[in-house]
Every structure is written in C-alpha cells, then in structure tokens.
Amino acid sequence: MAGTNPKPAHTLHIHDLHVEVGGKEILKGVNLDLFSGEITALMGPNGSGKSTLAYGLMGHPKYVVTKGEALLDGQNLLKMPVDQRSRAGLFLGFQYPQEVSGLTLSKFLWTSYMQRHTAETADAEKFGKDLDAHLAWLEIDNAFLKRSLNEGFSGGEKKRAEVLQMATLEPRFAILDEPDSGLDIDAVRAVGQAVSRLHRPDAGILVITHYQRILKYLKPDRVHVMVDGLIALSGGRELAEQLELKGYDWVRAGTAATN
C-alpha cells in the first residue's frame, strides 16, 4: 500500500520478560519491540532495570531469565549460548568495560572482525580504511590502538573503544548501556555523533541512558521509560525532552496511580 513504511530488515521482539538477580525479581514482564533502521532510547531512574534488560538479553549468568522470550528475527535468543547470541547479531556496549592487559585494542578489533568472516570474505584493506574513518569520527589518534584493551583508559576512552567494537562487528542490534556516563561535554558529542554516523538502515540501536544530552546527537525514533522493572511510558523524542525538564517523579506517580 502506498504511504506505508517498508518492512524492517530485522526485528527484536521482547515479550513478558522476567529477570531475577540474586533471587530478587528486577524485570517484571517487559514488552519491547526494536526494529532495524531505528534508534530507540530506554530511559529511567537508577535501579529501574535498564541494565538488567541488557545483561539478561546477552546471557550474563547472574541475570536469570525466569519467564518470557526475546526473538531476534524469529529466533529465541534466550535459548542460545552467549557466543551464539553475538553471532546472531546482538552486541552489548558495557557501562563498565573490563580491562584486558596485554591484548592491544587493534588485535582485539581484528580478532572480533575475523570471528564474523572467513579467510575468503575477510578484507584487511577495507578493515583498515573503515577503522581509520571510525577513529576520525571518534576524534582519537591511531596510537590509541596500540594500548592494552581498556587498561588505563579514561571513561571517555573506554566508551570510544566500545563504539569501535560496535563498528567492527556491524551487529543487527546494538545495545549501548549508558554510553554517556562519565563523559565530558566534548566526549558526549564525539560519541553521540559517531554512533549516529555508524547507524545503518539494516541495524537497530538501543541506547540506555538517564539523560537527554546524548540523544541530541542520536535523535531517537522512539523513547521508552522504565520504572520498577516495567516499561511505564513510551513516546517520541519529545518525551526525552519532557524528562529532562520534569524528571521521573511524574512518571512514577502515573505508574502508581494505575496499579
């Protein structure tokens, strides 16, 4: 039919997801749909369950899924081992990335690239050119690649390294857990603009954040607010602006009134 939106190349449908941590239920029935070609923002106060959603989807052993499903193009991620979830096209940019001494960032990125390619499909020249472009977008020097992964990195450098990994892997869906935390104004701009440039029509991005500041550069198509383990409110990018002005108390109050 004329005027209808084209069918997205990829979908991630999260239905009635319940997750426990240490025996305590954190997610209490989350329903969320992500589509390739879109940037989605997930906002909410501390302790609302945003990061629990990210780790539960990726299969962190401390985050136990007790009910629900997460279908990436019809395949249930929750039945896959962690490495298979990554190969299926799911990427998580950590809020607090781990340090790996002795493994340079360049070696890590090349190894990650080769996990998605064979000797026949790998293109070292293209990999190098793309990496140079991504470094320029993130406003970092090539010398950055010679350093051990995240070792001695500042908060901004760690977030830039996570974005480089996302760019290298080209996932179907990328979850970025608070990519703006601990960053100064210039780093927020650089990371936000780089993620926006890296966003592909055949991929979706879920950005978890407390604040509207990085969303000025990402311009999300959809904004969801999580409160007490549930999606409490959804809207367009104007919702993020409302939250910046009014905080989360009015969302909590509305949620309490409906329960």
Image (cartoon, helix red, strand yellow):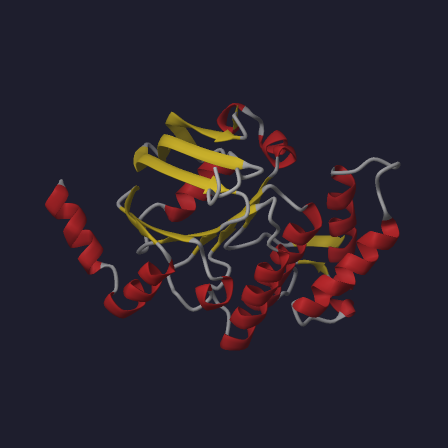
Front residue (pair 255, 238)? 238
Left or right: residue 31 compared with residue 200: left
Name the outermost residue toward the top: 79
Q: Residue at x 67, y 68 (%)?
A: 137
Q: Residue furthest left?
A: 257
Comparing 119 with 81, the one in front is 119
Q: Is the residue 131 above or below the residue 38 in the image?
A: below
Q: Is residue 54 above or below residue 95?
A: above
Which residue is depicted at the point 46% across and 57% down?
178
Q: Quadrant of residue 195?
A: bottom right
Q: Is residue 60 visible?
A: no
Quadrant where the C terminus sits is: top left
x, y percent for residue 200: 62, 51
Dividing the picture into quadrants, the one containing residue 156 is bottom right
Q: Residue at x 53, y 51 (%)?
A: 94
14 to the left or right of 246: right
Image: 55 above or below 99: above
Q: Residue furthest front?
A: 2
Residue 19 occupies quadrant: top left
Q: x%, y% of residue 219? A: 47, 62
